[in-house]
């Protein structure tokens, strides 16, 4: 399988170090997309916030020349502060202090290479506080202008107008973004697990020493795009059972 990161000419990931040196010194803005890896109900992948940041900043940077601006986009930072979702498997979180330090070191690297301005374009609500602290430290200690942008602060009225009050976490807005950019990843069909390879002393695939349950084959299913419907949230009943994510206009 060929691995592709799908970089464009404005992406730092596509540049040599010589190209990067010139681009960073002359760019009007360096853009850092930030997301998270966390549960997004039963119908969306854990990468929703990271995918939103990736696609939003792509459109932002591509539109910049129309306004006489030059931008360099950094690779999307996929991990964020998601401690509040850790009861759901698949969630990966950095500590708040760790996340702040990561942003500070990325920004310090850009300042060292001659960048004047850094826009942190964030698509995960949990990142906001450490992001703002990192921005303050960078401006104070490294002299680089930093613009921490939590994008929904600029689109809240339009989101409510389009989707109503339930547009937040794993709601209609995030679902529509994944349907638009990654329709094959949108759906609530559960994937069956790939069976483990039987283990024997001779590394044989024979089932003579293997539990019958381990020898059963399974087929991995791909979610059907047309089945991308929101899962109904489970009301809190005071039990210790894991609950479905609550959609909130303040969540993202």
Image (cartoon, rainbow, N blue to C red):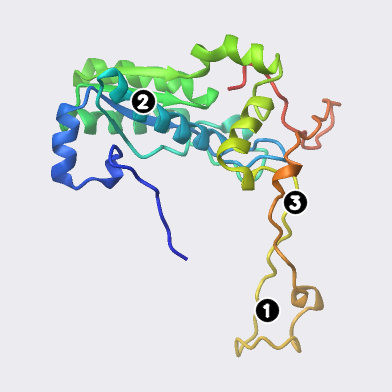
> Which residue carries the number 2 mark?
63
Which quadrant holds residue 125?
top right
Q: Residue at x 50, y 36 (%)?
A: 50
How many C-alpha atoms fall within 10 Å of the one at disc 2: few (<14), some, or many (≥20)? some
Q: Residue at x 42, y 29 (%)?
A: 59
Residue 61 left/right relative to 187: left
Element type at marker 2? helix
Residue 240 left/right relative to 111: right
Residue 99 left/right relative to 84: left
In the rendered view, tell whether residue 57 sits above or below residue 222: above
| Lower position in the chain sequence, tag 2 or tag 1 | 2
Q: Give the percent coordinates (x, y) of residue 150.
A: 47, 19
Residue 19 left/right relative to 150: left
How many C-alpha atoms fall within 10 Å of the one at disc 1: few (<14), some, or many (≥20)? some
In the rendered view, tell whether residue 205 sits above or below residue 150: below
Residue depth check, mark 2 versus mark 1: number of the one nearer the observer: 2
> Which residue carries the number 3 mark?
190
In this orientation, which residue lies closer to the viewer: 63 or 3?
63
| Lower position in the chain sequence, tag 3 or tag 2 | 2
In the rendered view, tell whether residue 218 sits above or below residue 24: below
> Which residue carries the number 1 mark?
198
Q: Give the percent coordinates (x, y) of residue 41.
A: 70, 36
| Lower position in the chain sequence, tag 1 or tag 3 | 3
Q: Residue at x 41, y 37 (%)?
A: 77
């Amino acid at each position: 399988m060929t691995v592709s990161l799908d970089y464009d000419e404005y992406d730092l990931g596509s540049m040599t170090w010589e190209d990067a040196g010139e681009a960073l010194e002359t760019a009007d803005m360096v853009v850092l997309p930030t997301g998270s890896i966390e549960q997004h109900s039963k119908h969306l992948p854990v990468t929703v916030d990271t995918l939103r940041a990736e696609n939003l900043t792509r459109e932002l940077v591509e539109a910049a020349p129309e306004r006489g601006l030059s931008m360099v986009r950094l690779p999307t930072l996929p991990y964020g502060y998601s401690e509040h979702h850790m009861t759901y498997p698949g969630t990966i979180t950095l500590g708040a202090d760790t996340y702040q330090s990561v942003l500070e070191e990325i920004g310090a690297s850009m300042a060292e290479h001659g960048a004047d301005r850094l826009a942190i374009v964030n698509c995960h609500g949990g990142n906001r506080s450490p992001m703002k602290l990192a921005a303050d430290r960078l401006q104070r200690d490294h002299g680089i202008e930093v613009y921490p942008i939590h994008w929904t602060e600029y689109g809240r009225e339009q989101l409510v107008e389009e989707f109503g009050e339930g547009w937040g976490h794993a709601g209609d807005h995030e679902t529509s973004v994944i349907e638009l950019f990654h329709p094959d990843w949108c759906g609530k069909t559960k994937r069956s697990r790939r069976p483990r390879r039987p283990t024997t002393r001779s590394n044989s695939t024979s089932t003579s020493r293997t539990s019958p349950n381990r020898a059963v084959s399974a087929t991995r299913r791909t979610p059907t795009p047309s089945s991308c419907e929101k899962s109904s949230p489970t009301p809190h009943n005071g039990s210790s059972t894991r609950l479905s994510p609550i959609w909130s206009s303040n969540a993202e």
